[in-house]
Image: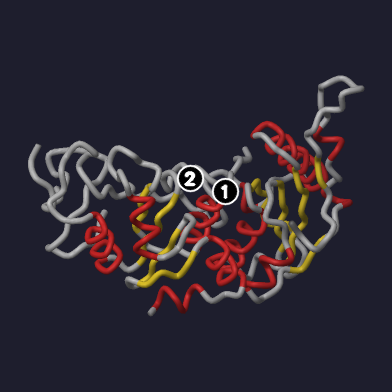
Amino acid sequence: MATINLSPLHTSSSLRFLSPHSSQNTPTLSFYSHPKPSLAFPSISLKPNRHKPRALTVVSALKKLSETELFAVPAAVEEVVGKFPDVPGVYAVHDKNDVLQFIGISRSIAASVLAHQKSVPELCCSVKVGVVDEPDRTALTQAWKSWMEEHIGATGKVPPGNESGNATWVRQTPKKKPDLRLTPGRHVQLTVPLEELIDRLVKENKVVAFIKGSRSAPMCGFSQRVVGILESEGVDYESIDVLDEEYNYGLRETLKKYSNWPTFPQIFVNGELVGGCDILSSMYEKGELAGLFQK
């Protein structure tokens, strides 16, 4: 039966930051006193027509798998990102002989294609794409199901990558690291300036991302993009929620002065500010991040 595949702390002994998951082994902090794409892809619009019934026929809105154009996957990373849409939808991956290997669902088709190209380049040679505008889980699942049923009806079998138990195409999501906390609470008086804690944090960790929200639930599109890029690159990074007024009280204004950078997110590598979402995205699209993180 087919399966649907939807696509802490590293500091020196001188400084230890708090994890939000409290336990007897939770580290303590010693610095406070005690208490869109260039190609035309088929798409599904989910905006209801005010003059028609609200019900949507998603399957009929999506082109059939057999009628959808097949696009070659470029060898260069930056070309993959530029060629395929960074939007939700369904996609079908073919090998060098144009044999269908996997049908997937993704919140970012470009990111999924790029991940497959890196993990199974010999199988990810060309792709068919169906974009779903303003999607929900049901719409994406219906789109996936329509392509799967068409393929099974034509061949009598499930694509190899969609067979139960197949782990070639979809990796298990690793457990996310907790976000760091700079203080034990806003009502506990620090014995050193917050700016000094920031300075030690970024210098004692290779990659630090100051984001809005947590890495598990970013609270703005720019932070979500940064988290997605870092994780797609397999970067081991520390994250700090600048909106956490309980454990990171005063961080936003202090960090702006420290970095001389007015917006968030902010990404530091080896103690130096790289920039925000636009800079990281540009480097990602040019394939320049691997060299940055290896320094």
Say which element carries label 1: helix
At horizontal 22% and vertical 47% (from top left) the residue drawn is 18
User: Measured along the vertical axis of the image, is residue 279 above or below residue 34?
Assistant: below
What is the spatial separation of the Cα atoms under label 1 and label 2, in whole angstroms? 8 Å
> Does 293 sit left or right of 13 as displayed?
right
Count of numbered tags: 2
> Which sits in the foreground, 99 or 260?
260
**Where is residue 170 shown, x and y percent of the image?**
54, 52
- What amino acid type is highlighted by mark number 1? Gly
**Residue 187 rendering spot, x and y as whole percentages:** 20, 36
Direction from residue 225 to residue 250 in the image, left or right = left
Quick one: which residue is furthest to the top in this view? 53
Q: Nearer the viewer, residue 63 or 257?
A: 257
The quarter of the rendered structure image containing the C terminus is: bottom left
Look at 73% across and 42% down and name the residue there.
148
Front residue of 175 and 217 = 217
Q: Is residue 122 left or right of residue 201?
A: right
Question: Where in the figure is residue 147, as x and y percent of width and height?
Answer: 77, 43
For the rendered model, the colour scheme is secondary structure
Q: Mark 1 touching mark 2, by CB under 8 A?
A: yes
User: What amino acid type is highlighted by mark number 2?
Assistant: Pro
Marker disc for residue 218: 2
